[in-house]
Image (cartoon, rainbow, N blue to C red):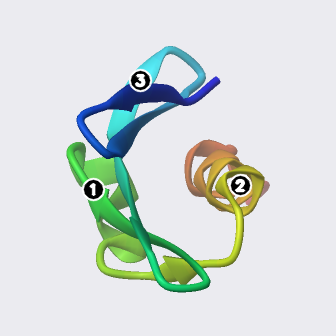
Amino acid sequence: MPTARANAFVIEITGIAAGLAVPERGGFRFYAADQRFAGLDGSRFGALDQIERAGRRQVRPTAD
């Protein structure tokens, strides 16, 4: 669940502090705090739940 921090939201994914969501016109910009979420760094999302879903996909194990 996102937590408000001085006009930004801390995004936690499966107990990991993934990064910050900073509000901007029409949505949020995500800044990764953990290397596992670097692929999302700088991405723009329309809603916080979209960031959370994308983050969960980053840490989901892949089948070989």
Instruction: Locate residue 53 relative to residue 20 in the image: left or right.
Output: right
Instruction: Locate residue 63 relative to residue 32 in the image: left or right.
Output: right
> Mark 3: which secondary structure?
strand
> Mark 2: which secondary structure?
loop
Q: Amino acid at mark 1?
A: Ala
Image: 3 above or below 24: above
> Could you tell me how far apart the alpha carbons at marks 1 and 3 are, in whole angstroms?
11 Å
Q: Which residue is mark 3?
A: 16
Q: Amino acid at mark 2?
A: Thr
- Image coordinates of residue 55 in percent, x first then y, are 59, 52
| First in residue order: circle 2 vs circle 1 | 1
| First in residue order: circle 1 vs circle 3 | 3
Name the residue nearer the viewer: 51 or 22: 22
Question: In the image, what residue occupies the spot 27% across and 56% down?
Answer: 32
* Viewer-nearest of discs 2 and 1: 1
| First in residue order: circle 3 vs circle 2 | 3
Q: Amino acid at mark 3?
A: Ile
Q: Which residue is mark 1?
A: 32
Name the residue nearer the viewer: 43 or 56: 43
- Image coordinates of residue 18 in percent, x first then y, are 38, 40
Question: In the image, what residue occupies the spot 64% across and 23% down?
Answer: 1
- Image coordinates of residue 30 in percent, x first then y, are 39, 65
Name the residue nearer the viewer: 13 or 30: 30
* Viewer-nearest of discs 3 and 2: 3
Are the residues at dot 3 and dot 2 in contact (C-beta closer than 8 Å)?
A: no
Please rate how many residues cluster around mark 2, counting C-alpha atoms within 10 Å: few if below 14, some from 14 to 19, many from 20. Answer: few
Are the residues at dot 2 and dot 1 in contact (C-beta closer than 8 Å)?
A: no
Q: Which mark is residue 2?
A: none
Please rate how many residues cluster around mark 3, counting C-alpha atoms within 10 Å: few if below 14, some from 14 to 19, many from 20. Answer: few
Q: Which residue is mark 2?
A: 62
Instruction: Locate residue 45 relative to residue 7 in the image: left or right.
Output: right
Image: 55 above or below 24: above
